Image (cartoon, rainbow, N blue to C red):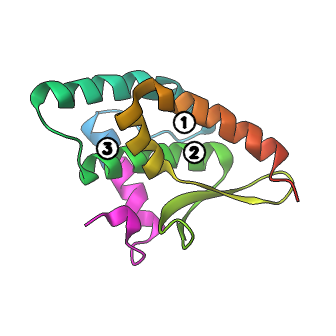
């Protein structure tokens, strides 16, 4: 089952998955915005190594891979943009919701972004996603 689509989960479920991922990598989960920004900066090269490793070993990526990486990315975005985990009825999946300067609520589908990054490579850069999200939050959606 794709747990990122399970409405009965709660935000703590994804936070714990992120902690598990960081523990496995033997790195500390970021406690401040700067640590989260560093995580975002290093995410694309890390994804490239992971995807190549999966391809070389003959293992396709799994729902578990998406859950671990997406939860970790979600925690970084939550920290940087003061967001929260929310279930999106519109997207049918857990997302990070953040408020733009103009008051618009924006849903960041980090799990879909991870899937796209794995499939499309650098065409779906995480750093670019962060930069475009930051720009969107500064402007918000037009009325």
Q: Does the segment drawn in magenta span residue 94?
A: no
Q: In this view, does 128 lie above or below 64?
A: above
Of callouts 2 and 1, the N-terminal one: 1
Q: The residue tagged with tag 3: helix, strand or loop?
A: helix
Q: Residues within 10 Å of mark 2 (few under 14, many from 20)?
A: many
Q: Of residues 31 and 83, which is closer to you in this image?
A: 83
- Mark 3 or mark 2: which comes first in sequence? 3
Q: In this view, does 75 lie above or below 124?
A: below
Disc 3: CA contacts within 10 A as few (<14), some (14-19) or many (>=20) = some
Q: Position of residue 133 (x, y in %)?
A: 67, 41
Could you tell me if residue 34 is visible in this image?
Answer: no
Judged by its main secondary structure, the magenta piece is helix
Per the image, label 1 sits on a secondary structure element best described as helix
Residue at point 34%, 52% (across, down)? 67
Of tags 2 and 1, the one toward the viewer is 2
Question: Closer to the camera, 143 or 28?
Answer: 143
Residue at the spot of label 3: 21
CA distance for labels 1 and 3: 14 Å
Mark 3 or 2: in front is: 2
Q: Distance between the residues labelled 2 and 1?
A: 8 Å
Q: At x 11% / y 32%, what residue is drawn?
A: 58
Can you tell which mark lies on residue 77?
2
Distance from disc 3 to disc 2, alpha carbons, whole Å, reads: 16 Å
Q: Find numbered disc 2 in the image and state the secondary structure of the residue it sits on.
A: helix
Region in magenta: 1-19
Q: In this view, does 41 lie to the left or right of 21?
A: right
Q: Is residue 33 visible?
A: yes
**Quadrant location of the N terminus?**
bottom left
Q: Which disc, if any, is residue 36?
A: 1
Residue, far left: 58
In primary-sequence order, the first of circles 1 and 3 is: 3
Marks 2,1: beta carbons within 8 A: yes
């Amino acid at each position: 089952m794709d747990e990122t689509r399970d409405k009965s989960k709660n935000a703590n479920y994804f936070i714990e998955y992120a902690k598990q991922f960081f523990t496995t990598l033997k790195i500390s989960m970021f406690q401040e915005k700067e640590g989260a920004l560093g995580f975002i900066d290093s995410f694309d090269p890390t994804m490239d190594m992971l995807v190549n490793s999966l391809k070389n070993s003959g293992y396709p990526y799994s729902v578990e891979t998406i859950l671990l990486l997406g939860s970790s990315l979600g925690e970084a975005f939550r920290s940087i943009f003061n967001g929260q985990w929310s279930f999106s009825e519109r997207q049918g999946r857990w997302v990070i919701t953040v408020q733009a300067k103009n008051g618009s609520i924006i849903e960041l589908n980090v799990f879909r972004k991870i899937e796209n990054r794995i499939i499309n490579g650098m065409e779906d850069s995480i750093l670019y996603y962060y930069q475009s999200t930051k720009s969107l939050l500064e402007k918000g959606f037009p009325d």
